[in-house]
Amino acid sequence: MRSNCLTIVHVFVLVTLVLTLDADGKDLNCETEIKVRRNTVYEAVVGQELRINCTVVFCNNSQTVYWFKFEKTPVPVNISSGSHIKTDWITLKHFRGISSLIFKNILSSDSGQYRCQSGGSVSHTINVSVHDHVESTTMTWTLEPENLTQDSLWHYVYSAVGVIVFVIIVTSISIALMKACEGVHCAKGSRTTTDPNPEASDHESDIYENDM
């Protein structure tokens, strides 16, 4: 009986760990976060270099950031070797960083609306306005990395607390099952010790009565 109980405990713990690892691997509740302020506007002069940014929090290392220019339909930005537009990635922390679209010698035709995308998440629109004169060169930047770090910190804190609580629950259930198994084993042993051979006892009692 004790062996069966221990087997049940072991199977329970094993199944729980497998389900936990599977859920952690799939990370079903995790969505890529893209931090870009609404109504972000970048202004530049023809011939300048301009860098526009998307701050991104990934769920895993396998994700990539894509840039699109919105005209009548979203058009992938040409970042081929012959293009004056390039991309760059700056790592902030694990799974977090800034994806940049860099315009070398920006052209008037580069004016328009841009968005970055990763997984199923898309940023707010980034407006790029290119001028022929120097008087308009102000830029509105994306959300600061410090704010991203602070926002994301709570996500990891909540995840860590959830894992700790889950481990405590599993451990408590396992200990309770093991104690229950020990209780059943002790009770069975007690019954065996008290009356190891009841038929022999009855037989001895009959002999004693006949002698009397």
Image: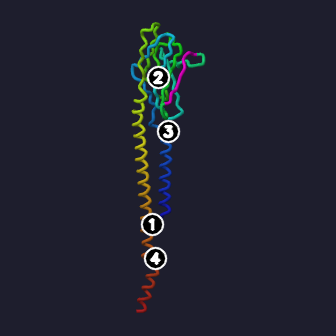
> Could you say which quadrant of the image residue 190 lies in?
bottom left
Using a 10 Å C-alpha cutoff, classify the residue at mark 4 as few (fewer than 14 neighbours), some (14 to 19) or many (20 or more): few
- N-terminal of the pair, mark 1 or mark 2, is 2
- Residue type of the residue flagged with mark 3: Lys
Q: Quadrant of the C terminus?
A: bottom left
Residue at the (40%, 23%) spot, across then down: 37
Numbered disc 2: secondary structure: strand
Residues marked 2 and 4 touching at CB (< 8 Å):
no
Q: Which residue is mark 4?
A: 196
Closest to the camera, between mark 2 and mark 3, is: 2
Q: Nearer the viewer, residue 17 or 39?
A: 39
For numbered disc 1, what is the local secondary structure? helix
Q: Which mark is residue 53?
A: 2
Which quadrant of the view contains residue 191? bottom left
Q: Nearer the viewer, mark 2 or mark 4?
A: 2
Considering depth in this image, is 39 or 49 the residue closer to the camera?
49
Mark 3 vs mark 4: in front? 3
Q: Give the label, 1 or 4, closer to the camera.
A: 1
Earlier in the chain: of badge 3 and badge 4, it is 3
Q: How many marks?
A: 4
Q: Is residue 98 above or below residue 81?
A: below
Whether 205 is drawn above or below 177: the answer is: below
State which region is magenta: 83-91
Q: Earlier along the polypeptide chain: callout 1 or callout 4? A: 1
Residue ID at (41%, 36%): 153
Q: Main secondary structure of the magenta part?
A: strand
Q: CA distance from mark 1 to mark 3?
A: 41 Å
CA neighbours of label 1 inside 10 A, class few (<14), some (14 to 19), many (20+): some
For label 3, the residue is 26
Q: Residue at x 45, y 33 (%)?
A: 31
